[in-house]
Image: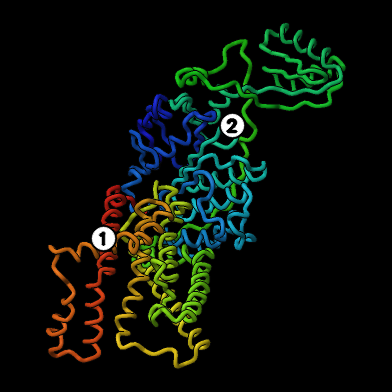
Amino acid sequence: MLQAIGLTSNPRRDRPAAVDDLTFEARPGAVTALLGAEGAGKTTALRLMLGLEHGRGVAYFRGRPLHRIANPAHEVGVLLGDVPGHPGRTVKGQLRMLCAASGVPASRADELLDVVGLGSLRDERLGNLSLGMDRRLGIASALLGDPHTLVLDAPSAGLSPRETSWLHGLLHAHALQGGTVLYTTDDPKEAARAADRVVTIDAGRLVADQDAAAFSGTRLRPRVAIRTPHAARLADALSKEARAGRRSVEVVTDGGSRLTVYGSSCPEIGETAFRHGVLVHQLADEIGDTGPVPSARQSEEDEGPAESGASVLVPLPAQSARRTSALPPALEARPARGPLRPVRYELRRMFGVRTAPLIGAAVLVVSLTMALVLARTGSTPLPGLLAAWPALLPLPPAAMGAGLIGALSYGDEHRHPALAGARGTVPRRIGLLLAKLLVTGVVAVLLALLAAVADAGALRLVEGPAFLRVPHDWPALCAGWAGLALGCAWAGLLGAGVFRITAAGITAVVAVPVLVVPLVRKVLAGPSAHSLGGLADRLHQLGRLGKPHGADSWLIALLRLVTRPEATALGLSLTALFCAFLFTGLRRKARW
């Protein structure tokens, strides 16, 4: 059961609260429609229930608020607006990525694609999907974790009648299995046809909470539509018979050959037309909206039996015959949360689009070109040639590429928040951060090594084998090169995570050599600072006792690397960004 108690949104500026003390419940085994006109507060109410909007009140999902549910994807399936996925990601790739985030088997994605009718479009890009296909993918995402409760915001908006019928069948199939369904709509006729219970709100307040039959009687006005070439004659006959029988019948002439009759039925009108010899071309039941009911109390009073002389309301035909759609099989076991799940998610997120491979290819092309050009000038030492790093640039191409990949790791999360559908902002859980640091770091180091190897091969091919000589301090060069790429990737990742934008991550990467390194050099060169220049040599004397020559050279190279101003600046920047990430993200204790 879903219970919303006292939901109240925070007022903005001089405007009143969009939702004001809203209390209702959606019961298991039934489809509940949250009905209201545009601007009535339906979407804000859902966002308050899901913790996406600041305000007061609480929502319980089977007795627990959402922030106390360990794995929300297994309890609540959410669809708010369009599918928040990268336009270049495929339909199957999007669902498989969400499978890794929700801890369900990857085969679940294929099952759901067949259920929602997207099996033939599994390799289609999200940016190429129509509105109907996007809605189907959103339903598949909501059903991914086999949730008990579905919370959907205007799921039928923009759909064709056939797609709307399929959607309603799917919702009723979920309810028949004991699930809870809450969806919003602004169409009273749709609510009467598709829902078992209708909760009507207006200006953020509860207006009525009724079952579908009571809602049809109080909110919808049945009528009969007639087309006849003798409209005036038939209207006069209907009015005379209604007065003679003391029945409340209203006949409205819509112009030409069309009549609309309230308070009667098709059989009665057909018999009247037959008795007066009037030819009828069309005779059909219709439903008309009378506007929102003024209060829940009045709605309860209107649910009673009709008084003498009142028009008899006809129940909707759709209430008695509803079709259900097939659902995916239930998950037999709920996998325990493990450390490999965020790693799988991050791998699928990064390599599910072409961005990272394109950045890698661009880095290799630029690095090779710059290395060959620098070799022709003859003014750059060999380490600078292998890194394709002229003195005029703050960073080499491989380090910039690593920083961009790192910035996109969190920047794309905020641009296309696939994990934030039911939990607000992008989650900042330590497991996800460590997975991003691991995957981004490995990719950055591999990109840097691949660029160095490619540059070396190109220089050897163009300049000859004698051009390349292994320097005596190659361990320090290798460690420094890998550390630079790793640090840039992590700086971009943390910068984008703190400020929630890719550009901030790139700025954090460039700021290290441009701003932080000169500042650190100035501090270390000051008269009051202790010199660290001889630290590596002093530790070298202590470390030679009992150490093999190979391990000793690597240790000394590492110590010399750590004591350099560049390494100090990078370490300080990463520490500051990590502390800022913890302060801005983990204080909310967001779950994913």
SS under mark 2? loop
128 displayed left or right of 302:
right
- Where is residue 451 drawn, in percent x and y? 45, 77
Q: Is residue 395 above or below residue 102?
A: below
As shown in the figure, which amino acid type bears the numbered disc 1? Leu
Q: Is residue 322 above or below residue 392?
A: above
Quadrant showing the C terminus: bottom left
Residue sitting at 37 percent across and 51 percent down? 499
Residue sitting at 78 percent across and 13 percent down? 235
* Residue 338 visible to the viewer: no
- Where is residue 61 drawn, in percent x and y? 37, 43
Toward the viewer: 107 or 20?
20
Instruction: Tell me the residue that label 2 is attached to.
Output: 187
Near mark 2 (Cα within 10 A), the count class, few <14, some 14-19 or many ≥20, is some
Q: Is residue 426 above or below residue 383?
A: above
Q: Answer whether labels 2 and 1 touch (C-beta < 8 Å).
A: no
* Residue 28 visible to the viewer: yes
Spatial CA span between label 2 and label 1:
63 Å
Among numbered discs 2 and 1, the one appearing first in the sequence:
2
Instruction: Tell me the residue that label 1 is attached to.
Output: 519
Q: Residue 509 lies in what quarter of the image? A: bottom left
As shown in the figure, which amino acid type bears the numbered disc 2? Asp
Near mark 1 (Cα within 10 A), the count class, few <14, some 14-19 or many ≥20, is some
Quadrant showing the N terminus: top left
436 displayed left or right of 578:
right
Q: Residue 312 lies in what quarter of the image? A: top right
Asked which colour scheme the image uses, the reply is rainbow
Toward the viewer: 209 or 523?
523
